Amino acid sequence: MYAEQPGKKETVIVEDVELFPSHIACSSLSKSEIVVPVFYKNEVIAVIDVDSDKLNDFSETDKIYLEQIALLWVERISDLSW
């Protein structure tokens, strides 16, 4: 889903995936979704993509915590010696 929104640099919460054009579900049971981009050096290097079998199952609280997880990953990547 994230790839469908070029230039989008923020978390996307989809309350009802059936209403989202061209949505590709990982499961036919998927009803809602949250997608959090993970940035490193201003580039999207990954996304956290969580589906739910319930409509409108993601909140601002989910967004905040998933974005914090994304930041922790980036901090860890930054600490690695490449």
Image (cartoon, rainbow, N blue to C red):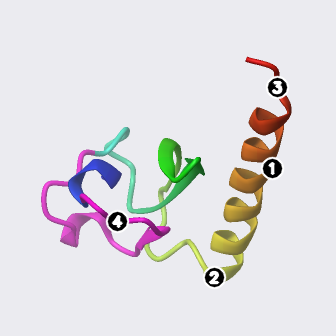
Residues under numbered marks 1 and 3 in contact, where contact means CB atoms less than 8 Å apart? no
Q: Please tell me which of labels 4 and 2 falls first in the chain.
A: 4
Nearer-the-camera pick, 21 or 73: 73
| Pair 4/2: label in front | 4
Q: Residue at x 14, y 55 (%)?
A: 22
- Distance, label 2 to label 3, CA atoms, is 31 Å
Q: Residue 64's quadrant in the figure?
A: bottom right
Q: Nearer the viewer, mark 4 or mark 3?
A: 3
**Numbered disc 3: secondary structure:** loop
Q: Which residue is mark 2?
A: 60
Q: Nearer the viewer, residue 31 or 63?
A: 63
Q: Cβ–Cβ below 8 Å for labels 4 and 3?
A: no
Nearer the observer, disc 1 or disc 3? 3
Reading the image, the residue beneath label 3 is 80
Instruction: Kindly indicate whether the residue at mark 3 contacts the one at mark 2 (C-beta within 8 angstroms).
Output: no
Residues drawn in magenta: 6-24
Horizontal side, residue 63 vs residue 69: left or right: left
List the residue tagged with mark 4: 8
Q: Position of residue 71 (x, y in %)?
A: 74, 55
Q: Residue furthest bottom?
A: 60
Indicate left or right for 41 with 6 as reference. Answer: right
Separation of disc 4 and disc 3 at Cα?
Answer: 27 Å
Q: Quadrant of the C terminus?
A: top right
Which is more N-terminal, label 3 or label 4? 4
> x, y (%) of residue 29?
38, 49
**Residue type marked 4:** Lys
- The one nearer the camera, 21 or 43, is 43
Q: Earlier in the sequence, mark 2 or mark 3?
A: 2
Helix, strand or loop at mark 4: loop
